[in-house]
Image (spheres, coloured by chain):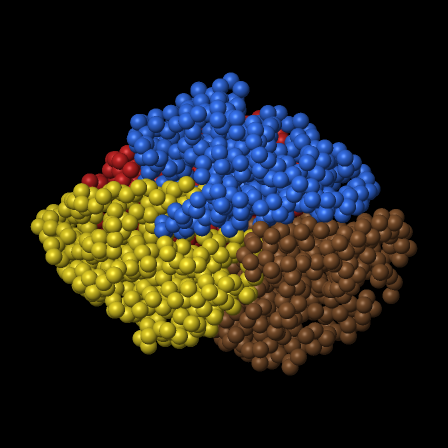
Chain colours: A yellow, B blue, C brown, D red
Amino acid sequence: MAEPIDPAVVEAENEKRAKALEADYEALGAHLDRRGVDIEAVRAKVAAYGVAVPSWGVGTGGTRFARFPGSGEPRNIFDKLDDCAVIHRLARATPRVSLHIPWDKVADLSELTERAAAHGLGFDAMNSNTFQDHPGQERSYKFGSLSHTDPATRRQAIDHNLECIEIGQALGSKALTVWVGDGSNFPGQSHMTRAFERYLESMKAVYAALPEDWRVFTEHKIFEPAFYSTVVQDWGTNYLIAQELGPKAFCLVDLGHHAPTVNIEMIVARLVQFGKLGGFHFNDSKYGDDDLDTGAIDPYRLFLVFNELVDAGERGAANFDPAHMLDQSHNVTDPIESLMTSAMEVQRAYAQALIVDRTALSGYQEDNDALMASETLKTAFRTDVEPILAKARLDVGGAIAPVATYRAAGYRAKVGRERPETSGTGGGII
Amino acid sequence: MAEPIDPAVVEAENEKRAKALEADYEALGAHLDRRGVDIEAVRAKVAAYGVAVPSWGVGTGGTRFARFPGSGEPRNIFDKLDDCAVIHRLARATPRVSLHIPWDKVADLSELTERAAAHGLGFDAMNSNTFQDHPGQERSYKFGSLSHTDPATRRQAIDHNLECIEIGQALGSKALTVWVGDGSNFPGQSHMTRAFERYLESMKAVYAALPEDWRVFTEHKIFEPAFYSTVVQDWGTNYLIAQELGPKAFCLVDLGHHAPTVNIEMIVARLVQFGKLGGFHFNDSKYGDDDLDTGAIDPYRLFLVFNELVDAGERGAANFDPAHMLDQSHNVTDPIESLMTSAMEVQRAYAQALIVDRTALSGYQEDNDALMASETLKTAFRTDVEPILAKARLDVGGAIAPVATYRAAGYRAKVGRERPETSGTGGGII
Amino acid sequence: MAEPIDPAVVEAENEKRAKALEADYEALGAHLDRRGVDIEAVRAKVAAYGVAVPSWGVGTGGTRFARFPGSGEPRNIFDKLDDCAVIHRLARATPRVSLHIPWDKVADLSELTERAAAHGLGFDAMNSNTFQDHPGQERSYKFGSLSHTDPATRRQAIDHNLECIEIGQALGSKALTVWVGDGSNFPGQSHMTRAFERYLESMKAVYAALPEDWRVFTEHKIFEPAFYSTVVQDWGTNYLIAQELGPKAFCLVDLGHHAPTVNIEMIVARLVQFGKLGGFHFNDSKYGDDDLDTGAIDPYRLFLVFNELVDAGERGAANFDPAHMLDQSHNVTDPIESLMTSAMEVQRAYAQALIVDRTALSGYQEDNDALMASETLKTAFRTDVEPILAKARLDVGGAIAPVATYRAAGYRAKVGRERPETSGTGGGII
Amino acid sequence: MAEPIDPAVVEAENEKRAKALEADYEALGAHLDRRGVDIEAVRAKVAAYGVAVPSWGVGTGGTRFARFPGSGEPRNIFDKLDDCAVIHRLARATPRVSLHIPWDKVADLSELTERAAAHGLGFDAMNSNTFQDHPGQERSYKFGSLSHTDPATRRQAIDHNLECIEIGQALGSKALTVWVGDGSNFPGQSHMTRAFERYLESMKAVYAALPEDWRVFTEHKIFEPAFYSTVVQDWGTNYLIAQELGPKAFCLVDLGHHAPTVNIEMIVARLVQFGKLGGFHFNDSKYGDDDLDTGAIDPYRLFLVFNELVDAGERGAANFDPAHMLDQSHNVTDPIESLMTSAMEVQRAYAQALIVDRTALSGYQEDNDALMASETLKTAFRTDVEPILAKARLDVGGAIAPVATYRAAGYRAKVGRERPETSGTGGGII
């Protein structure tokens, strides 16, 4: 299989920037050394870090008002894998792809595993979809899926999740992520207690089918597509689910799924403490589930989440092995560029969290020295760790400047010629 | 043209409820009389009140995740007018329809006016659409329309608005409503000042083409489809627009377009005070632009808006002639039922505002008697004015219980047979 | 002991309104009868209902900017009990008072029980206070209490709670409510996990001291006085506390302690479902913990909470016995008037929830008839149940119009003469 | 007058850090040079930048629940000036102090000017206070001040503002900042239109008394102390005020005074565009008007505000001369440390905004290259400009590490011995 990006382009682009990188890296190393931080140790951890990309993320997203497709939109999961390969080829931070069924369903799964293997990609968590009606589907999810009042509809939704597990097993996935749109638009429409009882009953059937070495991640969301109540509305309900289901059940945190002003890093801390943090859907938001590029709106919040994760890792928190995935909607950018940039933002927050002086922080916390505790975090956050990230990419053949290199390589123009134009479906719903 | 609803059904349904209504009306009349309120005067005002329905509202709405169509979805503007006729036939509160171009564009406008006239319906404000790309359109609105960086795209958007005015003139409309999705998803994407300058320049071109007896309503919205900044984000910007454009320009308030916790009735008061309140898009919301049925979530807020309107009317505020329109997305209900119910909710809030004891209220305000002022409003709001609304409908041949009567008449089943099933387009964008 | 309100005034005021009430009650009875509701059964339930008043609520509240005292401010717990007696005398809905230690601490508890008994009042839950420093207190709560990093400070806070239990036992209380302001103002200031571990450890010590027939209610709050993180920030954390502590531990819901847009009735439903709803602090809010009069801002939300409670009661939910208490800050009204009015608002919501047609509602929910389900709730909410409340008061010697009667009785003027003016302490903190 | 901080301590502390700073500065200079930025030019602008400190900010703040004073609380404006001198001595970024009347009122103004001059401090905008009742004041502001229903109360509030101007003239101030708490806690309590009319009338009287070379800044706030409506609730109303008053009237933006999720930098852009941006009260917030240290919660938002300011300055926006002031409540930190740190955060955001590549940004905006536009801002924000700030301080005799130096100098301990302990007044209001 042909390399999706010409190595000569990567090399040429890197060469333009190598000397400056070297200087920046050296200066940062000296600076960090003065702060008692070993830059090489940080680099090694950053290099080992990976975040999964969602297969659907390489297509242009949209809103209920409209979708404005870009050129070269992927036609199917094979095109999507090719795009994911480009992302990983250049940014070297996204070794796994997360599939969405039925969108990524294919007749022959071995073709999928072969294409992925050829690209050096693995498969992350499987995602079921019972928030839409699919062609040929017997019963509608208009009024819910796993919590529907009709047992046959619930059964259909359960069966779909079982199928996702089955597909995932063939692909080497080890987790199922369940997000449902179930809820209500009117007070009274749904009996909130009975709906949750039904949801739990359905999820227990899904849980029972989980292979021994799998985990299931349930995802909460305050609103949308339901606008009055959502069955799994927040981490409190999500925790109850994980607790009711059992030890293989964990909570997934999407950064855009909370009420305004909510302290998300605190939710992360609580879930870690009670052994139920399953993982993340990274993105950023200003208003609601905006699904913007990770770190684009509030990079300090992202850092504070990673501060909790690094802290939990370093103190050896029990049951702590969160899955990391991007989940964004790219409405106005080239999805490949956004996913590369976002993967690097996640890495950046991780690197910044790694250089927090935790001994000092602990002391300030113990002494209630609020100002110095805050400054300890800010100092780490303020450090420009870009040279560490760039070096980690360069070391394994990635690009110092992934976006510039991607543009230089002309990949979008190429697929724009190969793949037919798509129309702006999805519009007109207001 | 055949009556959309069999009058015999209406009559039969009314007969079942007439006696109870009579008793309730009489009791309410006696009660109001003790409070110094003449029930007949209230009824007359309610009967004279009308709220426009949007042509797009009779189709099932959806979210970016999915649309779950109902049966008998209208195929075109003629079907939509038929559905609107049913709404007005039964609830007698929606004498005008608001069109959306290009969705409702037809080759021969006289057909439209004839069909509307046959139904006894008029045309309200025209709505332009530059938030989507339409087949055959030369330039894309992906990065904006009236505020686009490219002058040719702005020109195209301006021309579209001019066409809307032209169509509206043929139909007897007297206003143009302009809502754009222009904005940005990333800090830096758009130069916020230059974008607004371009928007103003474009709108000045539209304004210049307004017929003498027309008004233009601009609509603000805090977010969606843009998720970092919106060009017309709030009433402050909206007011600046109206002021820059001139005396025929007014601000339109959609109840779901504000930041969380914002006091909407206060915005209404301010716009009234400065002579720039153009009108409303009524709906209800809990989280964002949820577009739920009016009064379904917070009926007291709706009442407080009408309290401002009635107060402004009674004190003869200058330049005060707001347009009233419903603007909702009916995702889980029969749109006809939702629009009838919502029209009645608007009437209800109006009726409750009419029976506020304004002399007493004024006195309490002057004396800073906060508790009694609050109780004065609550007393009006608590009054069950349903008999007044029902009587007003009955008097002019409408239904005492519009939803029950609609169901008894079997209209949905009938159009379900006549109109082909539609698919759940619009899904898959996340 | 002299009656706080002259019975002759009550009688005279009632006489003015008795005839109108009779007419309204009769008309409502006939109307409800047509809907299949027995007005007498509703009245009996309303008459049996009570909500506790907080001792601190009878003083004028304030903000960090200022406090503007009224005349006749209570000087101590005895004055407060007198004021509470007036509230119950007229509105007949607040048979118990909830004390706050150390504010209400007295040397001789028997004096307290005697004064309460003379007024026909009982004692509700005890409230501890570790969010302030009190004169003579050894260690400061500036940086927390039950979660403080210093064990001695935690011990002091625990001991204070034990003292509250002790006092409560002497007074016949059966519950302890614990609200703490513990949290942080800066990212990093507090180690969120360790702080919660310390909180849990402290609460376990308090729990261990609970008498057999007592319950403990913990209260969550998203922010204020801590402005970055709060140890017990939401119902998820609150549920974890109740679960960790044991069967006598329950969650208390204050209506103003949630993030913007959060669906509170859903939280109530979840806590009921998992047997951990302890009770309520009723009030209303538009922006934050505004502590406004119950039902003053969003009466439909209050109704929706009661809809959950009545539903839970009727289906015999396990472990369901929530405590009801008002918790408001009366900054611009006479506190006695606000508490009477708010107690009636709570009763009103309860009465409206009682007349929901639950059989019909259940059917609509089963059929996913969202519109009719919503209308079923709205119909109950729209019903003006004031005659039921007034009759229930009148039957047991209360006032048809408590506020008017209170004003006619001249109580505020009387205590204004007896009690010295207080100054606006509390201001100047910004 | 003795130096508040021993210069020898400053020198010794600086010496410890001078070499590292030199290395960091050099590396940053080389890095910026590669990006086409002249570090010296940036340093010169940063060195010339100043932000005012509020006199009340050097005292420990609190909430309505409690105030926990620190040691050495300033007793009066002279102590406050001493504390402000320390802040400026070390951080060299706060050359002016903003006074609050009547808190800072003194019999002999010349003493004030002398003390300030001795410290090398000037006076910034005067702040009036009509949100509290002051001892000896004839009429209460419980129900409002400039918008009160009673003309005599309004007159009193106007006169107070005139007195502030008079004092300010004596001190060399050139602006008056007016923030009022006027509003309402209940729907109906206040007639929103009439209240605003009265406010405008009062402000016109204040405006009429403004000296020729003065400006007046009005400040909006969404809520608190009023919890249902605030007379000057948002920038829309604030703009109307500035417009009604005249060319010397401008809008002041406090970063914590907006509804959740609101895009503040966009408000800044609008006010600049229409020539009405008066200035800022800098602080940070997560939930409401939290008054936390500037940049402590969302440093990127602060940067985005400065991005607008630098952009406006560079393109020579008309009427653009905003006043910069800190306005924070220091509840858990040493106020001097917080104010130094916050002043540096403001400088940091300014420095970062100065190194934005505006030519590139402009190009990306023109081309709708959202990703690169975002990255252009992020690149500037990610740059650790601390060496520039530190060098700018060092150059004029300030401290490389102001907080560490302050601690080493023992100032707090010294004033802790000299100034008596204060009590936690302000508590107990809930």
- Observer-nearest residue: A227 or A392? A227
Q: Residue at image x 69%, y 66%?
A: C98
Q: Residue furthest top?
A: B212
Q: Residue at image x 37%, y 37%?
A: B132
Q: Quadrant of residue A69?
A: top left
Q: Quadrant of residue A345?
A: bottom left
- Observer-nearest residue: B264 or C147? B264
Q: Kindly tell me whether residue D173 is visible in this rendering.
A: no
Q: Report the side of A256 relative to C16 (left or right).
A: left
Quick check: B350 above or below C398? Answer: above
Give the percent coordinates (x, y) of residue D418. Answer: 51, 58
Q: Kindly tell me whether residue B143 is visible in this rendering.
A: yes
Q: Residue at image x 12%, y 57%?
A: A1
Quick check: D134 above or below B131? Answer: below
- Observer-nearest residue: A137 or D140? A137
Q: Residue at image x 20%, y 40%?
A: D36
* Quadrant location of the N terminus of chain C in the rendered image: bottom right
